[in-house]
Image (spheres, rainbow, N blue to C red):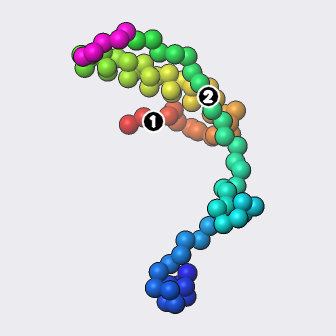
Amino acid sequence: QELCRRWLYFTPPLFYGRFYLGPLGMPFRVPLTTVVGAPIHTTKCTNPPPEAVDAVHAQYCASLQAMFAKHAPTCGIRFSEPLSIT
């Protein structure tokens, strides 16, 4: 890249992947696992109080941590601590 920068005065990007589609390329295939949890039921409110938003957010975070703890080992993720949401 340094040699190209000296000759062309810019550094062209280097692509890494499968190039059977010509210059566009495609990333290498990796397994992708999608997990869908139970729905969180809420009531429609045009101007919800902050306490209601915090309650639904806490329910969402708890559900997300439970799904992570349940499905992480089957997806090949090793963890020693629960999922941290900040």
The residue drawn where x is 63% and y is 40% is 78
Image location (x, y in percent) of residue 30: 70, 48
Name the residue carrying label 1. 84
Q: Nearer the viewer, residue 8 or 6?
A: 8
Front-lying residue, 20 or 6: 20
Q: Does dot 1 land on a helix, a strand or a loop?
A: loop
- Magenta stretch holds residue 82: no
> What residue do we see at 54% from left, 23% from top?
66
Q: Start and end of the magenta stretch?
A: 43-47
The reply to whether residue 16 is in sight is no
Residue at x-position 49% and y-position 89%? 6
Q: Which residue is mark 2?
A: 35
Q: Quadrant of the N terminus?
A: bottom right
Three-letter code, disc 1:
Ser
Which of these two is toward me, 85 or 36? 36
Residue at image coords 39%, 21%: 58
